[in-house]
Every structure is written in C-alpha cells, then in structure tokens.
Amino acid sequence: MVTSTLERAAEATPPGAARRIKGLSDRAIAWIFVAPSIFLLLAVNIFPLIWTINLSFTNFKANRNREVEYIGLRNYERILTDADTWATMQATAHFLFWTIAVQVLIGFTLAYLINKKFKGNDMWTTIIVLPMMLSPAVVGNFWTFLYQPQIGLFNYVVAFFTGADASSFSMIGEVALAPWAIVIVDTWMWTPFVMLICLAGLRSIPESIYEAAECDRASKWRQFWTITIPMVLPFLMLAVLFRGIENFKMFDLVVQLTGGGPGNTTTLTSIDLKREAFEKWRTGYASAYAVILFVTVFGLASIYVKALNKVKER
Amino acid sequence: MTYSVTEPSDRQKWIAGFLVIGYALITLMPLLWIIATGFKSPADAIAYPPKVLFEPTLEGYVNLFTTRTRVTEETLASLGEPTTWYDRIVRQYDMIIAGPSRYGERFLNSVIIGFGSTFLSVFLGTIAAYAFSRFRVPLKDDLLFFILSTRMMPPIAVAIPIFLMFRQLGLNDTHAGMILLYTAVNLSLSVWLIHGFIEEIPIEYEEAALIDGYTRFQAFYKVVLPQAATGIASTAIFCLIFAWNEYAFAVLLTSGTAQTAPPFIPTIIGVGGQDWPAVAAGATIFLVPVMVFTILLRKHLLRGITFGAVRK
C-alpha cells in the first residue's frame, strides 16, 4: 500500500521539474522524505492495531504460554453484556459531560473577559495556561495531597468558606465526592485550553460587524447573541472535540488521583482496560475492549466533525 | 486615540481584569503549593491549619536525592560531627545517608528519552512535511489525516500489542524502545505543525533559488529551513513537553533501566506514607522547566495544542 502511494507520488511530480535540477529528482526526494514517517507509523500504530483486532477473537493471555484458541465474537459478547462495562462507560460519560460543560462555561467567560484587553492581559493569560502544560501524573499525585482531609489545602479552603469541618470529608475517599474530585482537577488543568481557543475565536471577529450592528442600534445583548456566539461557535466546537477525545482517553491524571476508586466510582474506560490487560492479563478480552473503544472514538469523532463542518459552512 | 464603538469602557476593563486576575491567582495556588511544600520540613508539610509561612529547609531535596538508614545513638556519636550541611540535616533524625536515590537516574532517563524522541520526530516530521507541502503527493489529504488519526487512539489500547511486540524484540524497558515509541506518537504533531509553518513560506523563494542553480536539497536547507526555524523550534518544544509528561506508556513498558520521572515521582515514600516534601521537591525540579518553556512558547501555544488547526 505504501509503495503504490509513494510511486504515484513520484509519478505525479512532473518529469520536467525533475530533469531541470541537479542532484536527485523530485520524485526520489518525495519518496525519501515521506517514507520513514509512514513506515514508522505503520509499524507502531497500524501493525499493532491489526494485531489487536486479531487477538480480540482469541482467548490469549500474555502471561501464559498456552495454545491460543479462536473463540469468535465471545469476547465482544462478554464485554457488552457485562454490567461493569456499562458502569465504567457511565463513569466516563459523567466525567466527559461535566468536564466539558464546566470548561466551556469558564473557558469562554475567561476568554470574553481577557478580550476586554485590560492592561497586562497577556501576562495573566500565560499564567492561567501553566497547569495545562504540566505532567498530569505528577500533578495528579500532588492533588491527592491537596485533597487530604484535615491537612489538605483544598479541604482547608472549602472549610474556610463554608464553615464545614476540614476533616469531615474526603474528596477522593468518598463514593459521592470522588467523581467530582476528578472533574475539579481536570477543569483546573484544561480550562485554559478552551479559553485559548475561544480567545482566538473572539479575536477573529472583525470589528466592522459590531460597528454595523451599532449603526443599526442593536443592543449589546443582541450583538452578543447574534454576532459573538455564532462567530465563536466553530472554535468552541473544535475545543469540545479536542477535550472530548482527550478525556475519553483519560488515564494518567485519574489513575494518580483516585486509581479508579473508591470501589469503581472513577474507573474510566482506560483504567478498566489497563486492569484487564495488565493486571488480570486477559489479553484477548482486553483487545476486544480496545477495539470497541477505537470504534467508539472514531465513530463519535467523525459524526462530530460532520456537525462541525456544517456549522462552519453557515 | 480614535473613538471606537468596540473599545470596552474603563469600568469594563477594571471588572474584567479583576475577575481574570482572581482566577489566575486561584489557578496558581496548587503550583505555588508544590514549590512551597518542597521547602517545608515534614512536620510543617502536614501541619493544620496549612502553613503559609514557615522556616524553609532543604530536607525535601536531601530526601529526594538520597536514601537514608536509621542508626543507633552510639553509632551516631562514634561518627563525630557531621561535615556537610546535608549530613547535618539527616543526622537530626538519627539517620545517615546510605547512598544516592533513584531520582537522578530517572530524571536523566526523562532527559535522554525526551531529547532523543524529540530530535527524531522533528527530523522525520520536517522532511515529511516538506514533501507534503512542496511535492504533489497523491492521496496527500488522506495520508495527512491518517497521520493525525494515530493520535486519537487511547495509549492503553495500543499498549497491548506494543507490549507484546517490544517483548518479542527485547525492547521492553530500554531507552531505544521508548525513544522509538515517543517518536511515533509525536510524529503526528510534528508533521502537522511543521506542514503548517512550511505552507506559510512563499514558494517563490525556493523557485528563485532553484533557478539560481541550487539543487532541491540546497534550496531545502538554505532557504526553507532558516525560514521555518522558529516554527520548527516551537514544534520541538511541544514534542519535548509531550515526551516529558507522558505516563501511560512509561508505566506499562518501563520498570527499571528506562523508567522516566513521571511514574517514579509518585512512588517516593517516606516513613508512614508519601514523603510529601520530597515528592514536592521532585515535582518542582520536574515541572519548573516546563513552566519556563511554556512562557517562552506563549506566542505559538494555541497552534501547538490544536495541531495547527487554530492559528492566531
């Protein structure tokens, strides 16, 4: 497949151009330049993907040396009928919905405020962005310290403002609070991402549109809903797409924060998959699980991209 | 100043500034807390109420870089006066330094794997992006999309066959294996970003160079590369930060020789649970370089995090 593509690449380069210049021909250069990247991606992504699909029909266990049997769709059947899978999916959906909702709300508000161009807005924007660039595992681990009952800074601040006892609640130890604990840290880390994209959207709106609206005596409120929001919407949707894919894959931050607990309350799909694959060593089963996740991500993402393009066309 | 209907009033600016700075200060708190905790004594770190003012000490840093053993008072007395400042800190707890900790090695692994994979992915990404941008590659859009789509897969899902493949090839827990893996993961980012940067360079420059008798290669590295240098440099920093922060592959595929800092830092434990000042010290050393890079990168930040989809 690669060869044919590259050969066509070479053929498409006009021979005139190739002959005109000294040294290697353009088609040879195109060949040499693209091939290593494609080859590496095939080896590290596509080959493993095909292997995963193949394994998903077997009962293979990577820690045992026994005969591998093909068991058809039994792995898929088991996963889709397992109540735990659905609990995991539900935890993931909760995490996705709330992180996106809160981050869009805060991120857009911040971008809107920064776009008022107060003095020093550049510097403060950079400060707000910092958490996003840091190692989620290292930061997540430190947040467990902030979340400690009694001595944790988070509990202290909450206690200070609400009057509750700082040792009376544990964000990562209680079934009712843990799903929110991961939403809070993810929001802290990733709101700046949504903010930056919204800011780019706001800055892309030409001033002349507002000036025209002003001439037509449209109220500020009306300008906001009929100019600002529709013009920022494609940017906002792009931000949601990125956050959606990233949080669907979420592993490092949550593993360090809660490890999926207490019980299974914060066991997101990636964490569940890791347990099946690398703790229970049900390699075949986990491969089927991985395939289901691929299909879900690609399916949802492509439906979403279609919607995004529709909004852009308007 | 010319009058503009879209210029916010002073009052609006004040309110906006107040709210944004308020948010920024809240968001900065956990980071400042990490840095501060690194300089606290273990007692101060777990004090209630949490201590904002404290006497700074380097205990956390000493604990981070050493392993210590408890000794009896007689042994301690027989050793005589401590000769160095770090000995003095350790002796307060009736302990002596037994040797260096693993942190140094893990940090070095992060540096080797980070820089190695960054170099490779930027190199491969630059030449591929150049070819995509300047030659007529059929199925170009499909290939570019294929490259991007490799980033959508959850790392854990890809990790199963990679684990098996690496085991077969003897690459588990090796620097070479991790460099190769991170190179592949970062390739999508580097191809997409650098492609965008090269597209912005007018093709006329190269055509002029070719007419002047340059070969393609000469035109590439004497005309295109210097023009794209800033873009390539910021792409490199993004790749470096990704490799630096990566945890999922690192925790599954490395355990000893090639383990990087992110899986290691959370495992730093002291007497009775995590040694928070040492963890915070390790985190500080690990995170501060990224903060500096983020500040340097701020102009290209948006472009980097959206794979070039949004350009300011």
Image (tube, coloured by chain):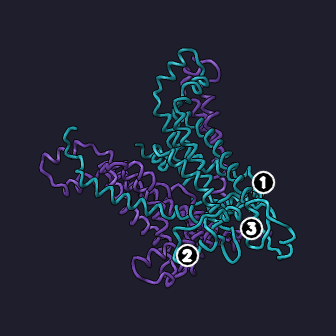
Chain colours: A purple, B cyan
Identify residue for label 1.
B169
Q: Mark 3 lies on which chain?
A: B
Q: Which amino acid does label 3 sit on?
A: Val
Identify residue for label 3.
B90
For residue A172, say whether it is visible.
Answer: yes
Q: Is residue B229 left or right of residue A231?
A: right
Identify residue for label 2.
A85
Q: In this view, does A283 lie to the left or right of A157?
A: right
Dot 3: element: helix
Q: Position of residue A152 (x, y in %)?
A: 53, 74
As drawn, the residue found furthest toward the front would be: B81
The crowd level at tag 2 (other Cα within 10 Å; few <14, some 14-19, many 20+) is some
Dot 1: element: helix
Q: Quadrant of the N terminus of chain A?
A: top right
Which residue is painted at 63% across and 72% down in the image? A75
3 vs 1, front mark: 3
Give whichever of B161, B106 is nearer the camera. Answer: B106
Q: What residue type is labelled 2?
A: Thr
The quarter holding residue B105 reads bottom right
Dot 2: element: helix
Q: Position of residue A12 (x, y in %)?
A: 54, 30
2 vs 3, front mark: 3
Give whichever of A312, B45 is nearer the camera. Answer: B45
